[in-house]
């Protein structure tokens, strides 16, 4: 028996909204894309002509005609759109960051539970094939170093670089480190916009793990790399190039004539370095997150990135922003 398709409506027809529209149409076995809404006439006309999609007259009109809502609007409008959808018991996919404030995020978590629907947050790097390829290699990570650098783009400057870019690495870090966050330190600078454009944050966890996160949207080149260090292993993930590598230190294989050895010193036996390049699948991360959203609805399973995950990332981001505000207030005096 063929599975009934989920009636989906998309809010937002901007750059990312158009990508979601195209991919939702490709996922025709999962979704029936019934239409979209965007208040911008020019963007809407393009989508109507390009994809032959119905444009609803309002958020309320769209929500009334669908099973699930995909919110790909500006961050400042996430909350109202999601609240209306949840109050009408619709499943919700909401782009990152989940909301503009922590208070709004908490309200969404509470309402999602009341509505008893699926809510997935668009932390797309969880679905990056380079990150997925090393999932089975993580084992008590003790140090994380991330760099997410971007050339300046006016799109996204409605929020700070913490909510625009660093939020990705906050979520990745929280997904890898299963421990309570003990301390947050941060510094940042506003250069071209009214909110911080570059930020460095240090997260210290109860299990001893430390994460050093750097994000910038005023760099000369783009970079999205993370390095994970644990006992006897070093894992690197290049989210942009979609490559990953695992370097392990193990006991020496006497039958390996090409072994790369290191001397630990102090009379200890030599160890051998093993290089592993995990197979990275060829997949579109956004398409994969939308597919798993559909599957969570169909199977009544929890989404891979839950509304609580979105809240937790937002909670850490807010602590970082609070640190930046505190630091700037000191320098101002």
Image (cartoon, rainbow, N blue to C red):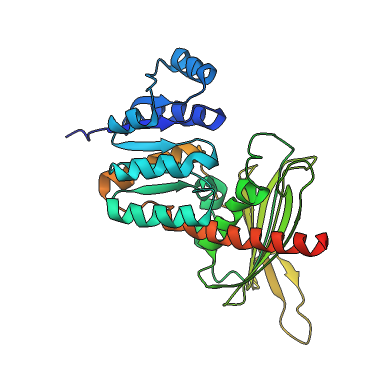
Task: State the residue lying farthest toward the bottom.
Answer: 267
Which residue is depicted at the point 54% across and 28% down?
A: 14
Q: Is residue 199 left or right of residue 295?
A: right
Q: Is residue 300 visible?
A: yes
Say which of 113 and 278 sits in front: 113
Say which of 114 and 252 sits in front: 114
**On the image, which quarter does residue 269 sit in?**
bottom right
21 vs 173: above or below: above
Number of marks in picture: 0
Residue 73: image location, x then y, percent: 50, 35
Which residue is depicted at the point 31% across and 45% down?
A: 87
284 vs 34: above or below: below
Which residue is depicted at the point 65% across and 62% down?
A: 322
Which residue is depicted at the point 76% across and 48% down?
A: 190
Q: Is residue 28 visible?
A: no
Say which of 304 and 128 sits in front: 304
Quarter of the picture containing the N terminus is: top left
Residue 214: image location, x then y, percent: 71, 55
Quarter of the picture containing the C terminus is: bottom right
Task: State the residue lying farthest toward the left.
Answer: 1
Q: Is residue 280 left or right of residue 161?
A: left
Q: Is residue 65 left or right of residue 104?
A: left
Residue 207: image location, x then y, percent: 57, 77
**On the image, which quarter does residue 328 sit in?**
bottom right
Say which of 10 and 89 sits in front: 89
Q: Is residue 111 left or right of residue 241?
A: left
Task: State the residue lying farthest toward the top.
Answer: 49
Residue 244: image location, x then y, percent: 62, 51
């Amino acid at each position: 028996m063929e599975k009934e398709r989920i009636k989906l409506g998309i809010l937002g027809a901007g750059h990312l909204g158009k990508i979601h529209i195209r991919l939702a149409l490709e996922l025709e076995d999962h979704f029936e894309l019934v239409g979209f809404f965007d208040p911008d006439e020019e963007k809407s006309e393009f989508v109507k002509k390009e994809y032959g999609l119905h444009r609803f007259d309002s958020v309320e009109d769209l929500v009334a005609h669908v099973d699930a809502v995909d919110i790909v609007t500006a961050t400042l409008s996430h909350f109202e759109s999601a609240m209306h959808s949840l109050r009408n018991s619709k499943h919700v996919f909401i782009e990152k960051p989940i909301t503009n404030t922590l208070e709004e995020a908490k309200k969404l978590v509470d309402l999602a539970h009341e509505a008893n629907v699926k809510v997935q947050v668009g932390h797309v790097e969880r679905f990056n094939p380079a990150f997925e390829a090393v999932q089975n290699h993580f084992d008590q990570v003790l140090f994380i170093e991330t760099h997410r650098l971007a050339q300046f783009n006016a799109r996204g400057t409605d929020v700070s670089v913490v909510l625009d870019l660093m939020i990705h690495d906050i979520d990745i870090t929280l997904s890898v480190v299963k421990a309570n966050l003990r301390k947050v330190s941060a510094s940042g600078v506003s250069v071209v916009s009214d909110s911080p454009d570059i930020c460095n944050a240090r997260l210290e966890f109860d299990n001893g793990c430390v994460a050093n996160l750097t994000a910038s949207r005023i760099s000369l080149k783009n970079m999205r790399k993370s390095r994970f260090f644990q006992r006897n292993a070093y894992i690197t993930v290049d989210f942009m190039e979609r490559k990953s590598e695992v370097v392990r230190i193990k006991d020496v294989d006497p039958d390996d004539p090409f072994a790369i050895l290191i001397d630990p010193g102090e009379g200890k036996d030599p160890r051998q370095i093993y290089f592993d390049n995990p197979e990275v699948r060829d997949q579109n991360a956004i398409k994969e997150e939308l597919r798993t959203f559909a599957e969570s609805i169909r199977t009544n399973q929890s989404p891979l990135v839950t509304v609580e995950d979105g809240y937790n990332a937002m909670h850490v981001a807010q602590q970082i922003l609070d640190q930046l505000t505190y630091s700037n207030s000191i320098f101002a005096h």
